[in-house]
Image (cartoon, rainbow, N blue to C red):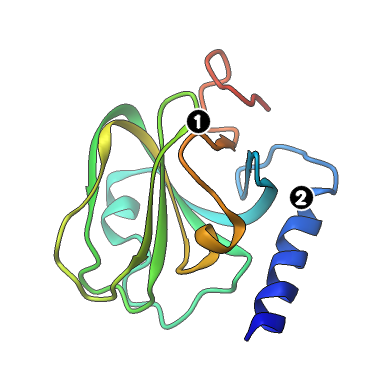
Amino acid sequence: MRLLWATILAALVGGAAMAQECSPNTVYLRGDWGQVRFAVELADNNRERARGLMFRDSMPESQGMLFVYPFPGPVAFWMKNTLIPLDMVFADESGVVQRVHHHAIPGDETLIWGGKRIQYVLEVNAGIAGALGITEGSQLRHPAVKQGGAVWPC
């Protein structure tokens, strides 16, 4: 199992060393722990945000979904109809990670509170955020992050 995670982490972190072009289907995260790149699907309207990753049997390790809200505000998620365990990374309007929720349980309807001024939420497979060391204070880079106020602009 350790070899599997080491291989996955090497692929994720190694990919971040490539040219860092901003693209709607790519999210970068960085912090004291290093940096990583994920291929993402965007959920940037009410319909897409409501559906999220529900009803999916799996998701590749290097992929995720980025939820983009029009304005920062209070955000809470649940796992109803979600079949895969997830880590959730909650970021504010400047792209700074405010909270990381590890190992959300498939099907659980308990609300997962992200914070009061959240504008971006990245969902990845459970265990990845912890394995990489993604923590509060990490920085998220994506074209949706308001470029005038982004801590890591495109």
| Position of residue 18 measured from the top left corner of the image (x, y, whole percent) | 85, 48
**Amino acid type indicated by mark 2:** Ala
Which residue extends farthest top? 148
| Residue under the point 65% across and 39% down | 32
Q: Label 2, secondary structure: give it.
A: helix
Q: Could you tell me which quadrant the N terminus lies in?
A: bottom right
Furthest residue toward left: 110
Percent across and percent down for residue 113 are 22, 47
Q: Nearer the viewer, residue 111 or 132?
A: 132
116 up-or-down from 102: above or below? above
**What mark, if any, has residue 45 been given in the picture?**
none
Which residue position holds label 2?
A: 16
* Real-space CA distance between mark 2 and mark 1, rounded to the nearest whole angstrom: 17 Å
Badge 1 amino acid: Gly
- Circle on res. 95: 1
Q: Could you tell whether 56 is left or right of 62 in the image?
A: left
